[in-house]
Image (cartoon, rainbow, N blue to C red):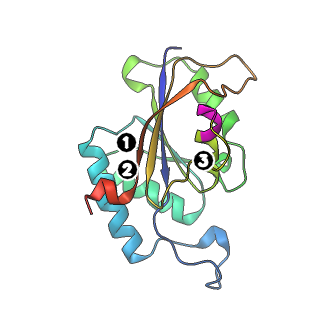
Amino acid sequence: MAEVELILLRHGIAEPRGSGLQDRLRALTPEGRERTQRICQRALQLGLGAPSLVSSPLVRARQTGEIAVQAGLAPRMVCSEALAPGADPWPLLQEWMGQERAEDSRRLILVGHEPDLGDLACRLIAAPAGAMVLKKAGLAMLRLAHAPAAGSFPAGEAQLLLLLTPKVLLGS
């Protein structure tokens, strides 16, 4: 497979930890929903849509993915435990990258959590762990020149194309 692009989107502003809810059930706040909608609309204007979107199944990430779909960033969303906090998204990515795709469908949006998305990006670009942190509803875009060999992780084989904070995306 030729090059693929990954867009990593962190979930929006959610209910605080310790609010009496299980972590999996924390939802976006009204401010988080509104801000995430504006960010997704701006990302669409910038041409950052994709034919595929995979989200963590946790409520706040799933809501962010739904907002991205409503904004037109992707036609639909699927959820995967591979994007839950502390999980390893690499098998999901490897499966996706190993599938034959049309030229215009080689972009994937992943909606998840920190530090997991930042750590994934760091591994892919061979940066030290923790060197990249996505703000809530912030995004990063990476390009991998080719699909890796079966079972291997392409550390250092990706390029960071974009790292956009909500402030940059919203012009504030």
| Three-letter residue code for mark 1 | Pro
- Asked if the magenta segment contains residue 148, the reply would be no
Mark 3, Cα crowd under 10 Å, few <14 / some 14-19 / many 20+, is few
Q: Mark 1 points at which residue?
A: 75
Instruction: Choose the circle earlier in sequence order: 3 or 1.
Output: 1
- Nearer the camera: disc 3 or disc 1: 3
| Three-letter residue code for mark 2 | Val
Q: In this view, does 154 lie to the left or right of 107?
A: right
Placement of 46 over or under 84, stated as above or below? above
For label 2, the SS is helix
Percent x, y for residue 18? 65, 82
Q: Mark 3 points at which residue?
A: 131
Q: Name the residue under label 2.
A: 69
Q: What stretch is highlighted in magenta?
A: 122-126
Q: In this view, does 80 lie to the left or right of 53?
A: right
Percent x, y for residue 38? 29, 60
Q: Quadrant of residue 85?
A: bottom right
Instruction: Choose the circle earlier in sequence order: 2 or 3.
Output: 2
Instruction: Choose the circle earlier in sequence order: 1 or 2.
Output: 2
Percent x, y for residue 39? 33, 56
Residue closest to the far bottom? 20
For label 1, the SS is loop
Mark 2, Cα crowd under 10 Å, few <14 / some 14-19 / many 20+, is some
- Nearer the camera: disc 2 or disc 3: 3
Q: Is residue 120 left or right of residue 15?
A: right
